[in-house]
Image (spheres, rainbow, N blue to C red):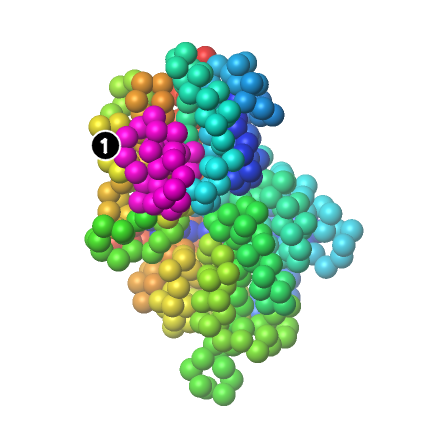
Amino acid sequence: MLSKRIIACLDVRDGQVVKGVNFEGLRSAGDPAELARRYNAEGIDELVILDITATLEARRALADTIARVARELFIPLAVGGGIRTEADAAAAVEAGADKVSLNTAALADPALVTRIAERYGSQAVVVAIDAKRDAAGGGGFAVYARSGKSAAGRDAVEWAREAESRGAGEILLTSIDRDGTKAGFDCELTAAVSSAVSIPVIASGGAGGLDHFVDVFTAGRADAALAASIFHYAETSVRALKDHLRRRGIPVRV
Amino acid sequence: MIALVDYKAGNLTSVKKALATVGADLFVPDAPDDLAAATGIIVPGVGHFGATRALDAPWVEAILGRVGEGRPLLGICLGMQWLFEGSDEAPDLPGLGLLSGRCHRLGANGGPAVKVPHVGWNSLAIQRVEGTILDGVDTGAQVYFTHSFVAPITGDSAATTEHGERFASAVQRGYIAGVQFHPEKSGEVGLRILRNFVELAG
């Protein structure tokens, strides 16, 4: 039986792991390679490096960070943040990324998804969708670009379907409302997207306790769940989380 | 020296890194004739079966020639599917035909509805260990998959896995082996399998 995946996200800026709340207020959480090593030893299923570096000079250091993390890990590694062109994707892949995650660039140029999928295969293309509940209370979920700063004018379910048809292999779905709050994943958002596509959906944003993962794998119909803060500050170990999930009848890799 | 055949079906960085870690002496052949130097051959690959079209007659002849001399061959993911007679994914394109059977899309024969592609960690039910590259791997061990098409279960199956239906996740017939999953992304279990193949290739 296919296991539900637990994915740790390393938000990296200038070579260091940082983490904010609601996409703002960053604090340092350590060296990426060191954290990656620890998570791997604890049984993490996959890692995501999200580059939130602003400047071009510092971005060149990203390849070094990827290579350092990838060197001793033999589990899937995805890289996202600022990948705008096929050349950016190629640089990440050459450095050791198995998957690249596209967000703003895919919204601006959806054909980029297809071009990268044709070059590296759909399994290498993750489309990241940052979504927020409609303020009007219409029950929909609006997509945001540029790290949650600007409304993309698209519905999350509709964009996920298009991403799949254009060649995306997975959807990384982040609830902006829940990001960093530890209030639990947005299970309604996750279930709406997961039911609409055949490709796996990785739920993100809001992990605060063990039962939040149980909820997102059942009510949320997520195929994988991603978290950052609860692992970085050693509030929850990957192993304790998996033990909890297994006791609740959720298939996990141990 | 082990030849890692690059036919542009996906990136080989991870495969090279994993093979280097288990001590493989590796080269990427530029032309079919280069396979003369190979003590073992690995055909990796991800994506559409149509990508195997790049493995044209001279490559097929060179690979079959080395296999005929008893050199071990390992197909990974798409490379494993290529060992069979063909795949419904590209019906007009023949596979290498070393193993009997055709590959089909997951769920094509009915069964419970599951997400396709099959992406993530799933467990192996070991059928045969003796004389296979699964030495040291136990039933229940989890490995990383990402694929939509699968090979049928036959007498050559060394391990099976279930996702909507049960399929061959590892095959071996003499020195011809294949794995549907990605050993280079499957932690210690995957490294063990690669190490077993490298030892087989001497």
Circle 1 is placed at which residue position? B154
Q: Position of residue B25 (x, y in %)?
A: 55, 18
Whether residue B97 appears in magenta in the rendering, the answer is yes
Q: Chain of mark 1?
A: B
Q: Residue furthest right?
A: A57
Q: Nearer the viewer, residue A88 or B40?
A: B40
Q: Majority secondary structure of the magenta segment?
A: loop
Q: Nearer the viewer, residue A176 or A92?
A: A92
Q: Position of residue B79 (x, y in %)?
A: 43, 34
Q: Can you tell which quarter of the image residue A108 is in? A: bottom right
Q: Nearer the viewer, residue B114 or B193?
A: B114
Whether residue A148 appears in magenta in the rendering, the answer is no
Q: Position of residue A249 (x, y in %)?
A: 25, 54
Does B90 appear above or below A167? above
Q: Can you tell which quarter of the image residue A43 is in? A: top left
Does B4 appear above or below A182? above
Does B58 appear above or below A171? above
Q: Position of residue A39 (x, y in %)?
A: 48, 44
Image point 24% across, 43% down: which residue? Answer: B166
Q: Quadrant of the C terminus of chain B?
A: top left
Image point 58% across, 54% down: which residue? Answer: A115
Q: Nearer the viewer, residue A86 or B103?
A: B103
Q: Which residues are magenta?
A: B77-104
Mark 1 residue type? Thr
